């Protein structure tokens, strides 16, 4: 079965307040469990008020997960950025990981641009590289 | 000496034991045989009078023989004899009396009511007959001596005997006790006889001077033997009858049971409220062996118990109560049944579980949309009616998907169905358990929100619109659709379901009109707009009937030298009150209500006869609507117009919009080819606004492309638009098509599109649409211009 990649961004509609971090952790845990089951890898990027998620896997599984997300009241203003066949998975080691670190970078990066609906030069490859860079300190910490 | 002690002496010392035994046995036998016969005869048809007297004779002989056997065995006076007259008279008397008394019984039977007191009176009378027989017999007793009676013994004999007979009669009415009646009666006979005999005192006296003809003990034995024989014969006959009867009853019961076990239906055979037999089906139904059911009270098996009796009147629904507390829905039907001569109740027990299950399934199927599993329109209408019944506030949302048809047409019905299911899932996720979602059909859904105010309804509608605006991924394809939602509030926007639904529909259409992917709440102005549309529709129908239209012409010019080369015919509707009605307003309406064909045909005929007067090098362009294109008669009608007006086909060009091509590709291709074969030119109008691609154009026999005004406007400033126009022009030329640019308003645009290769130009720069008279003037000017040019040449 051919591999697809799906990228979307959305608004974080979690109720704000002290439980926010725990709620995020719960999302990542539930999503990780589901993704393992469906054979999906991916990463969830969180920046204040916004989500960006990259998912890789077979098309039917991605359709199912995306439909689930579209019904989830914790996500709003969902915008599909990419749904396309790809040669290989870029996040194959991760069933789900939450990243809101900036990987030592300051200022506006490709993720910020993407979260605001602006494509970087170089398209989704640039975006994915930016996410991978952001993940590095996280994985080191782990 | 008291009567009891006297009786003891009398019985033990004054009677021969053999005679005493025989007498008592005979008496008991007679009563038992009679009882048995009566019981048997009760169950079979028989000649009542004959049998009554036969039974009276047997019983009478028995009782009579009892008396005389006792007298023969009376040892106090062994040489006594019995006067023939009294002996025979007592026999006759007792037989007649019994026959007569049994006749009462018959009378009572006829009235179907046999009271206990009636039977007691019968018993009492029979007892009295026995007493009379006894004393008549005693009166004929001849012995040397005078007979006197002690009063206490006689009194006990009378009171005791009659009381026993009355009691025997009383208990013979019904029930098991009735079988004791013959024994009581036999004891009664014994009491009468032996107490009476114990009260007998014989005083010495000379024998009568003139003794009557009398039986001695020896001669009396002959009639007694005959009587015994008669009783025995009757007994044997009764036994035979009884056995035959029993066999027949058993056979019938077995046959019925065999039949009953073949039946799928549960069957119970009952007698007097008790189950005698149950077939296998009913035993299975009750989950108990057939044997266990026997002997139970049938009414207690059902709830309500009265259902069993009611089942005689017709089919009754009830519950079968099982010992495991299950209640099985059943239908009961009962019939009276005569079996072995006895009245039985046959109860049919029909299991209703399967039927009820099937009915429930059918009901569910009739109320469910098979694709989404949601309520369908029918179920929703019922629910809405119930919700509005109590005048409670409620909100109704009507949701219509935008752009669903395109998905269905391009990706197929399977993808369409999947998308509908997913859309339904998203709506359901939004409303949760706050409302009830239904699919009304196609891509239309409804949500009933009981008890919700307008704010809550709007919030949910907004959420539904948002969730349905997210893309759908179907079969690895991205489908962008959307939804328009109309909201109507009960009771203020309609207290009746039909009103509420119509108003929510109006609001939904208003949402669609205002750009889709949004929600609208119903307001009364929407009705006004509908009224307006209805009034316009009426006016339009009238205008078509009265030909109240005009044809205007917008000139076409050649890009090369700017000369006039023809005109596009455009319909105008001057309305007495409305003024000039915009074609953008009435043409879609005419298309919708099916008047466009007639209008289009009229325009074609008018324009063609006008264009006949124009110079021969000019051509006439006429629009053909999608609806006209779908009409199988179009080609004939165009040919007729050409023949009638004598306009050469090559001077006519029919314009078709891109959207007309979408409907039925094959049919459209055939019609266009036929039109082309007439020699008519074919132009594709408004190119660039629809869906068709240039590469698809070669499938249709178009002779011209008209580039939409939206490309022309701003093409002098925008490089990409200019690129598009150039590409179209080049491609059209390679396909052998001419190109017309619409909407030329400035000289700059004219230069620009001319340079890109467009041959024909149209727009306000050259002239607005004008009445026929003005275009005629233009034609005359052209002619003069041509003549001048020719003259100059």
Image (cartoon, coloured by chain):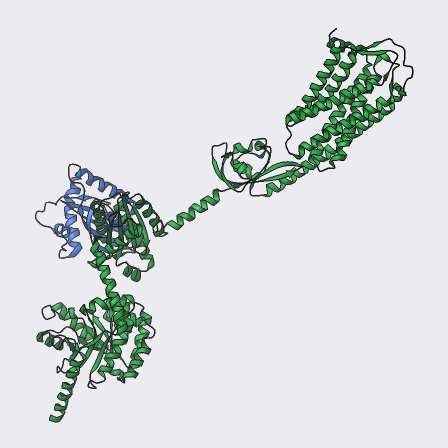
Residue furthest toward the front? B209
Quadrant location, the N terminus of chain B: top right
Is residue B11 positioned above or below B178 on the image?
Answer: above
Along the viewing direction, whichever of B3 and B155 lies nearer the viewer = B155
- Quick check: B757 above or below B122? below
| Residue under the image location 74 percent in, 28 percent down | B34
Chain B, hue in figure: green
Residue B285 drawn at (x, y percent): 52, 38
Does residue B550 appear to the left or right of A108 in the view shown? right
Please tell me the colour of chain A. blue
Count of picture labels: 0
Of the pair B183 and A78, the residue shown nearer to us: B183
Is the residue B781 above or below the residue A120 in the image?
Answer: below
Residue that protrudes farthest toward the right in the picture: B209
Residue B478, image x and y in percent? 25, 56
Note whether residue B759 is visible.
Answer: no
Q: In which quarter of the image is residue B781?
A: bottom left
- Which residue sits furthest top? B1
Q: Residue B496 location in percent, x, y?
A: 30, 49
Position of the C terminus of chain B by quadrant: bottom left
Q: Can residue A95 be seen in this view?
A: yes
Residue B785 position within the rendered picture, expressed as x and y whole percent measured from the top left: 13, 88
Give the image quarter of residue B83: top right
Quadrant position of residue B718: bottom left
Q: Residue at x 83, y 16 (%)?
A: B73
Q: Which one is in front, B556 or B208? A: B208
Horizontally, residue B147 falls left or right of residue A110, namely: right
Taking the image as shown, residue B303 lies to the left or right of residue A63, namely: right
Camera-side residue of B504 and B693: B504
Q: Which residue corresponds to the image point at 81% horizontal and 11% vertical from the top-left?
A: B148
């Amino acid at each position: 079965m051919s591999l697809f990649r799906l990228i979307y961004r959305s608004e974080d509609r979690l109720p704000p307040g002290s439980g926010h971090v725990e709620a995020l952790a719960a999302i990542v845990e539930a999503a990780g469990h589901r993704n393992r089951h469906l054979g999906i890898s991916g990463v969830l990027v969180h920046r204040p008020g916004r989500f960006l998620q990259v998912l890789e896997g077979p098309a039917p599984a991605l359709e199912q997960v995306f439909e689930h997300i579209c019904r989830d009241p914790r996500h709003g203003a969902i915008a599909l950025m990419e749904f396309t066949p790809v040669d290989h998975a870029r996040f194959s080691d991760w069933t789900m990981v939450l990243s809101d670190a900036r990987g030592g970078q300051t200022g506006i990066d490709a993720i910020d641009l993407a979260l605001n609906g602006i494509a970087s030069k170089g398209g989704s490859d640039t975006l994915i590289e930016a996410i991978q860079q952001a993940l590095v300190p996280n994985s080191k910490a782990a | 000496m008291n009567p009891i002690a006297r009786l003891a002496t009398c019985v033990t010392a004054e009677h021969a034991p053999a005679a005493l035994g025989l007498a008592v046995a005979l008496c008991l036998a007679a009563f038992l045989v009679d009882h048995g016969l009566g019981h048997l005869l009760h169950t079979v048809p028989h000649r009542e009078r004959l049998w009554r007297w036969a039974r009276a004779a047997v019983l009478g002989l028995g009782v009579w023989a009892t008396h005389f056997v006792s007298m023969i065995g009376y040892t106090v006076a062994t040489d006594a004899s019995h006067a023939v007259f009294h002996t025979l008279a007592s026999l006759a008397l007792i037989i007649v009396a019994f026959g007569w008394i049994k006749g009462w019984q018959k009378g009572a039977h006829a009235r179907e009511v046999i009271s206990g007191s009636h039977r007691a009176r019968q018993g009492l009378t029979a007892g009295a007959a026995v007493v009379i027989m006894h004393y008549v017999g005693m009166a004929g007793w001849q012995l040397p001596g005078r007979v006197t009676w002690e009063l206490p013994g006689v009194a006990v004999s009378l009171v005791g005997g009659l009381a026993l007979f009355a009691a025997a009669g009383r208990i013979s009415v019904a029930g098991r006790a009735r079988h004791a009646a013959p024994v009581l009666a036999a004891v009664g006979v014994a009491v009468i006889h032996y107490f009476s005999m114990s009260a007998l005192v014989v005083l010495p006296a000379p024998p009568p001077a003139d003794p009557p003809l009398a039986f001695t003990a020896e001669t009396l034995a002959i009639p007694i033997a005959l009587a015994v024989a008669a009783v025995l014969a009757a007994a044997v006959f009764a036994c035979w009858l009884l056995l035959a009867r029993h066999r027949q009853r058993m056979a019938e019961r077995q046959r019925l049971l065999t039949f009953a076990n073949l039946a799928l239906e549960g069957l119970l055979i009952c007698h007097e409220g008790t189950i005698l037999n149950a077939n296998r089906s009913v035993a299975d139904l009750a989950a108990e062996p057939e044997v266990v059911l026997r002997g139970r009270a049938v009414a207690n098996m059902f709830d309500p118990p009265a259902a069993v009796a009611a089942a005689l009147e017709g089919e009754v629904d009830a519950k079968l109560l099982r010992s495991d507390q299950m209640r099985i829905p059943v239908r009961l039907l009962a019939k009276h049944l005569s079996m072995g001569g006895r009245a039985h109740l046959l109860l049919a027990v029909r299991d209703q579980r399967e039927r009820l299950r099937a009915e429930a399934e059918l009901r569910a199927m009739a109320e469910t949309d098979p694709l989404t599993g949601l309520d369908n329109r029918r179920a929703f209408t019922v629910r809405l009616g119930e919700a509005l019944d109590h005048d409670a506030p409620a909100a109704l949302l009507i949701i219509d998907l935008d752009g669903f048809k395109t998905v269905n047409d391009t990706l197929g019905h399977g993808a369409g169905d999947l998308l509908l299911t997913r859309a339904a899932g998203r709506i359901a996720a939004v409303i949760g358990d706050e409302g009830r979602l239904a699919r009304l059909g196609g891509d239309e859904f409804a949500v009933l929100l009981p008890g919700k105010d307008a704010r809550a309804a709007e919030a949910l509608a907004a959420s539904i619109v948002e969730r349905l605006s997210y893309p759908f991924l179907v079969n690895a394809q991205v489908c962008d659709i959307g939804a328009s939602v109309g909201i109507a509030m009960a009771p203020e926007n309609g207290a009746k379901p039909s009103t509420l639904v119509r108003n929510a529909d109006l609001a939904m259409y208003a949402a669609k009109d205002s750009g889709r992917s949004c929600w609208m709440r119903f307001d009364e102005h929407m009705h006004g707009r509908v009224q307006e549309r209805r009034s316009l529709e009426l006016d339009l129908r009238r205008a078509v009937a009265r030909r109240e239209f005009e044809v205007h012409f917008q000139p076409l010019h050649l890009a090369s030298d700017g000369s006039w080369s023809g005109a596009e015919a455009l319909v105008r509707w001057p309305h007495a009150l409305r003024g000039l009605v915009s074609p953008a307003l009435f043409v879609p309406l005419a298309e919708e209500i099916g008047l466009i064909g007639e209008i289009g045909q009229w325009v074609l005929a008018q324009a063609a006869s006008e264009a006949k007067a124009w110079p021969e090098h000019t051509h006439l362009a006429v629009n053909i609507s999608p609806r006209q294109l779908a009409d199988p008669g179009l080609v004939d009608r165009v040919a007729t117009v050409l023949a009638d007006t004598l306009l050469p086909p090559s001077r006519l060009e029919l314009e078709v919009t891109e959207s007309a091509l979408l409907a039925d590709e094959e049919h459209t291709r055939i019609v266009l080819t036929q039109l082309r074969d007439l020699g008519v030119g074919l132009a594709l109008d408004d190119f660039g606004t629809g869906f068709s691609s240039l590469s698809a154009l070669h499938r249709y026999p178009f002779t011209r492309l008209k580039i939409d005004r939206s490309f022309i406007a701003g093409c002098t400033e925008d490089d990409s638009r200019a690129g598009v126009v150039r590409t179209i022009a080049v491609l059209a030329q390679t396909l052998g098509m001419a190109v017309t640019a619409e909407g030329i308003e400035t000289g700059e645009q004219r230069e620009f599109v001319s340079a890109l290769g467009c041959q024909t130009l149209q727009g306000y720069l050259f002239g607005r649409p004008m009445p026929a008279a003005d275009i005629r003037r233009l034609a005359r000017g052209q002619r003069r211009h041509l003549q001048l040019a020719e003259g100059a040449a």
